[in-house]
Amino acid sequence: MYEYGDTKLHIVEGDITKMEVDAIVNAANNTLLGGGGVDGAIHRAGGPIILEQCKKIGGCPTGEARITTAGNMPSKYVIHTVGPIYKDGTKGEDKLLYNAYYNSMKLAKEYKLKTVAFPSISTGAYGYPKEEASKIALRAVMDFIDEEDYIEEVYFVLFNHKDYELYEELLNQTFKEQ
């Protein structure tokens, strides 16, 4: 566990659908109608209520965020955000990924949520290089904390040990430098 301002930052290796937090973040596609990876797992675990609510929302532009209930999962809400499909790093992918994290935090605050869990957005099928994506994720979360200082705990939930180690190394390096 790391502390940044009044916020605790955690890294967890595991299944985001089992997190007992106010909101888990879904790495969704623009339709919000489900897909593979984290998105598919969240829709399956949460049940049909999530899909019903996503249909009413009507989609989400890349870099923005929308919210639904969490259905059958232990969290209260799902914040659906759309990260960029990585092309070559020169098409504004970094700003869009940053916005996906930042806008998710902003939406959590709007709903008065204190604990949020993120997956590694855009690093699966969307092909974003994991090391670069992890740095953007941490920067966006820390920038939000600097500006708002509202969220009490942020979890980075990584599906495998290699990704966990990447975040652990980044956080250790970041907090050693401060």
Image (tube, rainbow, N blue to C red):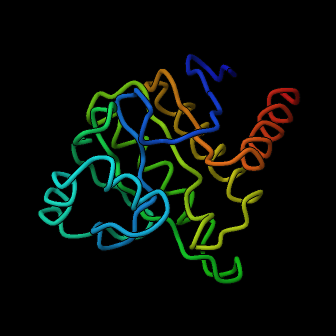
Residue 139 quadrant: top right
Say above or below: 128 vs 169. below
Seen at 50% across and 65% down, the residue is 83
Seen at 68% across and 58% down, the residue is 133
Q: Nearer the viewer, residue 166 or 112?
A: 166
- Residue 30 point in image, percent of width and height: 35, 72
Seen at 43% across and 24% down, the residue is 150
Quadrant of the rendering where the N terminus is positioned = top right
Residue 112 quadrant: top left
Say above or below: 141 vs 34. above
Total labels: the figure holds 0
- Residue 174 point in image, percent of width and height: 81, 35
Q: Nearer the viewer, residue 18 or 120?
A: 18
Residue 113 quadrant: top left
User: Would residue 88 be found to the left or right of residue 144 on screen?
Assistant: right
User: Would residue 34 be found to the left or right of residue 155 on screen?
Assistant: left
Seen at 63% across and 66% down, the residue is 94
Quadrant of the rendering where the C terminus is positioned = top right
- Residue 107 point in image, percent of width and height: 33, 43
User: Would residue 82 be found to the left or right of residue 73 on screen?
Assistant: right
- Residue 124 point in image, percent of width and height: 60, 66
